[in-house]
Amino acid sequence: MTSPNAQATLAQTLALAVEALRDVSDTPRLDAEILLAHALGWSRARVLARLQETIPDDALQAFRVLVLRRAACEPVAYLIGSKEFYGLEFFVDRRVLVPRPETETLIDAALEWARQRFSPHDTLLIADIGTGSGCIAVALAVHLPNAMIYATDLSSDALTVARQNVERHGVADRVVLLCGDLLAPLPQSVDLLVSNPPYTVLDAIDAGVRLHEPHLALDGGSDGLAIYRRLLAAAPQALRPGGALMLEIGATQAEAVTALARRAFPSAAVRVLRDLAGWDRVVTVLNVEC
């Protein structure tokens, strides 16, 4: 990013940043606006309302560093330390995967199922497997006041981040963080299992993601299905009769994951839900008989 002179306006500073980010981001203008707002300590709306004002030297230097890091494909969420998910703000850093908007399809499905099956006075037990930042567990806890949620992760570092988010959103009394492999830490069977497991093949994903986000949260093995095989094999013992399982999947994995699900739950109803972009995104297994 070429340095503007000391009297550069916010508009001029943004224009230079957009050019610097054009080849590495699908949303260079948005990225630049978010990073500039962060450097200034302002809201993005305030930045857009004051584009003809000059930028202070200290903010300009901080912004230039952020743009250089973004130009090296570091996610914006890591640069500003937060990411919005399901209308909630989450702290994130390199210890956890950045929450993606497509995962909101999983939240929608879980909330719909829970509200149809349980009254507000019933206690609902949920397990979020591979919780990462805790975004799924927290979103469900916020929207389901009757739910008790076990959130597991193999990474103690990820659970440290999740704890901050659980506390930030005031659900620490109903979200229990457990360190361990997949379902192993669960103290009892649950009504609903949800998970956004690692499902990518590392060599096939975007370089920026591969360089900066934790491989433990990304690596689905040579075919992207390794965690699904293990999770679905163990899931029948972790679900109560009449329970449900919901798994986020990669856009091309519906056929393979539904086959694994039907093998594990031969009498259950297995369906595939699409995200807002029209891609296969969630496999649901309903009316489980254990």
Image (cartoon, helix red, strand yellow):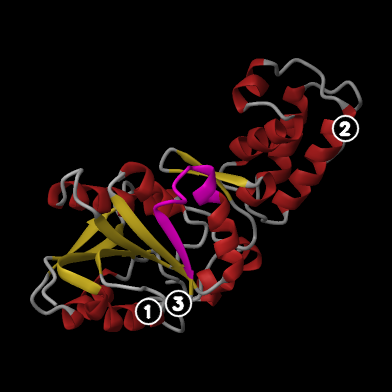
Label 1 vs 3, first from the N-terminus: 3
**Which quadrant is the N terminus positioned in?**
top right
Q: Is residue 206 magenta?
A: no
| Quadrant in the picture for residue 184 | bottom left
Task: Label 2: state its secondary structure.
Answer: helix
Q: Residue at x 75, y 24 (%)?
A: 10
Callouts 1 and 3 close, C-beta under 8 Å = yes
Looking at the picture, tell me which residue is in the foreground, 93 or 50. 93
* C-alpha gap between disc 1 and disc 3: 6 Å
Question: What residue lies at 86% left-to-right and 25% top-to-bottom?
Answer: 56
Q: Amino acid at mark 3?
A: Gly
Pick the residue in front: 144 or 58: 144
Determine if residue 285 is in view.
no
Point out which mark residue 225 bears. 1
What residue is drawn where x is 13% and y is 52%? 117
Q: Residues within 10 Å of mark 2 (few under 14, many from 20)?
A: few
What residue is pinned by disc 2? 58
* Outermost right residue: 6
Q: Give the magenta part as a residue range.
A: 165-178
The one nearer the camera, 165 or 39, is 165
Q: CA distance from mark 2 to mark 3?
A: 43 Å
Residue that carries the numbered disc 3 in the rendered image:
220
Does 88 sit above or below residue 288?
A: above
Q: Is residue 17 above or below residue 127?
A: above
Query: Could you classify mark 3 by the number of other residues whose Cα lies within 10 Å: few (under 14), some (14-19), or many (20 or more)?
Result: some
Identify the image quadrant of residue 271: bottom left
